[in-house]
Image (tube, rainbow, N blue to C red):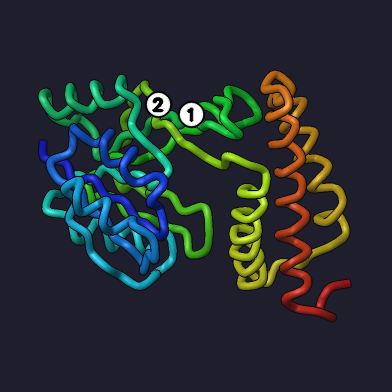
Amino acid sequence: MKISATIITYNEERNIARAMESLRSADEIVVVDSGSSDRTVEIATKLGARVIEQPWLGYAGQKNYAAEQASHDWILALDADEALSEILEAEIWHLKKNGPQFDAYSMPRLAQYLGKWILHSGWHPDRKVRLYNRQNAKWVGKYVHESVQVNGSVGRLDANILHFTCQSLSEHLKTMDRYTTLAAEEIVASNRKIGWRHLLVDPLWTFFRTFILQRGFLDGMEGLAIAWMGALYQFLKFAKARNMRPGRES
């Protein structure tokens, strides 16, 4: 079982080394960069990655392009701000030794937010398919929240991908601005009607679900921030969508 690890990048000099250094179980690392102006390409090249420049194709498109450039059918896809835990590395080594029994594998993802590991708030286990045979799977999702669609069987690995998210609220707000714009474009493209329920009820429900039902309060101040930011995300994506097509909503 030969594995090609793929990472898509844009100005990820802060994260790329950590991600690549966790990929010792991969037989090659392919980095597809969309025009970084920092040291991302330099660092990735020095660490042994095969770096390919590719203008932005969207999240799913860029990741599918990376998989197409790989030398092997088995793809281990990481985001630049992620890393395999040591236990997950060991699981993958074991899988390589014994051979795959499924067409793809999902694994839980553990996120670090504002310097704290988040165990509640709907953020864990947050299972993702990240190891897959490209003959039977591909990335889908035109705008945001892309995922791997598998035409076959999916096995489960037990150890975590580590996700190093925002280190500050300012960083979170900057990221949210980009993602809510993409989400708004998706809403507009689907011709979905936007009402006051989306602007008022949905954000309040998101806060209640995250902080109370998903026990975000157990994550402390960080859990409170996640709940508020989740509510703001819901409001902004609908408000932006409404603003993109003025006069069309009641």
* Residue tagged 1: 110
Residue 3 coordinates in the image, percent (x, y): 16, 41
Residue occupying image coordinates x 30% and y 22%: 86
Q: Is residue 201 left or right of residue 93?
A: right
Residue 153 coordinates in the image, percent (x, y): 30, 37
Q: Is residue 79 visible?
A: no
Give the residue type at disc 1: Leu
Mark 1 packing: few (<14 Cα in 10 Å), some, or many (20+)? many
Mark 2 packing: few (<14 Cα in 10 Å), some, or many (20+)? many
Residue occupying image coordinates x 26% and y 42%: 76
Q: Which element type, helix, strand or loop, lies under badge 1?
A: strand
- Front residue (pair 143, 54): 54
Residue occupying image coordinates x 11% and y 53%: 71
Dot 2 or dot 1, earlier in sequence: 1
Extreme residue toward the bottom, this view:
247
Q: Is residue 210 left or right of residue 109?
A: right
Image position of 127 with respect to 152: above or below: above
* Residue tagged 2: 160
Q: Is residue 228 visible?
A: yes
Residue 125 coordinates in the image, percent (x, y): 50, 27
